[in-house]
Image (tube, grey):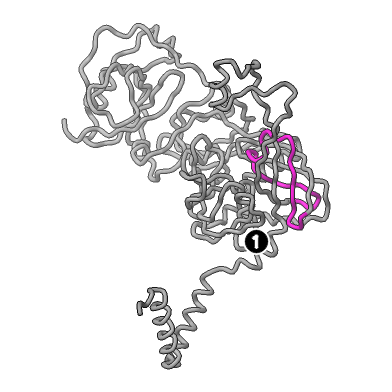
Amino acid sequence: MTVRPRTLAAALAAAAVALAVALPLPAAAQAQNQNQNQNRAMLLPDFTDLYDKQSPTVVSVDVTQKARAPRMPEISEDDPFYEFFRRFGQVPRPRGAPEREAQSVGSGFIISNDGYLITNAHVVDGADEVSIKLADRREFKAKVVGTDKRTDIALLKIDATNLPKVAIGDPEKLRVGEWVFAIGKPFGLENTITAGIVSAKGRDLPQENLVPFIQTDAAINPGNSGGPLFNLKGEVVGINSLIYSRSGGFMGLAFAIPIDVAMNAVNQLKDKGRVTRGRIGVQIQEVSKETAEAFGLKQTAGALVNSVEKGGPADKAGVEAGDIILKVDGRDVVNSSTLPRIITQVKPGTKVTLTVWRKGTQRDIAVTVAELKEAEAAAPAKRNGAPKEKAKPNRMGLVLADLTDEQKKELDVKAGVLVEEIAGVVRGNVQPGDVILAIISRGQTIEAKGAAQVNDLLAKMDKGAPVTLQLKRGENTFYSTLRLPNGE
């Protein structure tokens, strides 16, 4: 008789169980196993009570949009182009045909007993109707009080009272590696809980520098958007907003908007229906290790001021190009992304204190924050009449030339040196056509007045020393740090 693998496996398993029963473990071993199990239980959080308490504060957001067909001329089925449009899904809708409805789902949560809710702006974008379903199965039509697309926040209101509401946490106290959990409606599955840890904080994402995203590996999928991210105290610390995915589903990388950023927008939407942000009128860039060394700064931190808007808040307060902003009202500016996040959260008209590094010393500057408005990108200035005679490459492989009076007037500079060509390999952001305004090395800033002067300065510097060039490219002023070659 042939014994099937499944039957044989079952027989072996039964024999193992019988042997385990027949030969009990010593008391010491049993106690050790029991302690290990208890330790595992202590390490892994129990989400049952947290779910029971917090799930009533989470809602389902159902959005209806009317899909309006494009206006097209009527085409007969006998027309040779009819088949073309049919294949590509563009058959004209007959006159009088009803508009189709598109539906989407998301999540949200209650922030007040009288019916205010939060979700993502992209969840309700273009909505003709928004329906809210509570955990107790009640349904309400929601009004969109306001949205802020820059932070992806939407404030909704339903006509209800005595609702359970979330407790607001402090994302600043959130630690990487800490347990968090999400409740939402992934793929339409209501009141789904998933758990994970905080993978990172302060994440920069493409095209968005105002939100320091919380990264988590809690499973977040389409439909979770707008739902809360809780800590183990049951407090909301973030709003689930984005996932990184190649398949459309969860891949271990999810991103949440910190709740303090969200509440700043929510409070403004509730009070005045729009969100205002602060600005001080500076262009900034990152401070690299080489840049910090060139400026005489011990730590690699802060935001390097490329240029200061004429007549802007920073200009009026005395901030200069070349300053490195280290703190705002005592808050550390860890990198260049930190500064706009801090300033945009400040109410316009508020006075803040900037701690800046300038020419080897630290000083405080009081700046009155203005309101941020969308500005059009300025077109780069043209440069004409380049010098006819070209010099030899200098120590860094740059071919420099003096600016003509016409070029100085056009570029609105009093002095500077034109980068005509790059003859060697320059490891930095320098291009032909750039104008060198100043050279910074060992904490000293020297204005670039002529090609011979700049070449002479570079020739006298130590081998391998970092040097920062203040450059003007079009309408933009910025800094580029390079190292001098070790050879001649």
Which residue carries the number 1 mark? 234
Vertical comparison of 174 with 449: above or below: below
The residue sitting at 47% across, 87% down in the picture is 31
**Image position of 396 (left or right of 368):** left
Is residue 257 something one can see in this rendering?
Answer: no
User: What span is colored magenta in the figure?
Assistant: 112-137
Q: Residue at x 62, y 35 (%)?
A: 149
Instruction: Name the element at disc 1.
Output: loop
Left or right relative to 303: residue 222: right
* Residue 64 position in % (x across, y down): 71, 38
At label 1, the amino acid type is Gly
Residue 211, image quadrant: top right
Residue 273 highlighted magenta (yes or no): no
Q: Position of residue 315 (x, y in %)?
A: 55, 26
Determine whether 273 is above or below 184 in the image: above
Q: Looking at the picture, how far across and down is residue 14, in whole percent?
A: 44, 84
User: Which class describes the residues within 10 Å of circle 1: few (<14), some (14-19), or many (20+)?
Assistant: many
Give the left or right position of residue 64, taking residue 383 as reference.
right
Residue drawn at point x = 64 percent, y = 46 percent = 226
Residue at the farthest front position: 1
In depth, the one of 107 and 199 nearer the eye is: 107
Seen in the image, is 249 located left or right of residue 452? Answer: right
The correct choice, above or below, for 141 with respect to 449 in the image is below
Given residues 191 and 333, the one toward you in this image is: 191
Magenta-colored stretch includes residue 113: yes
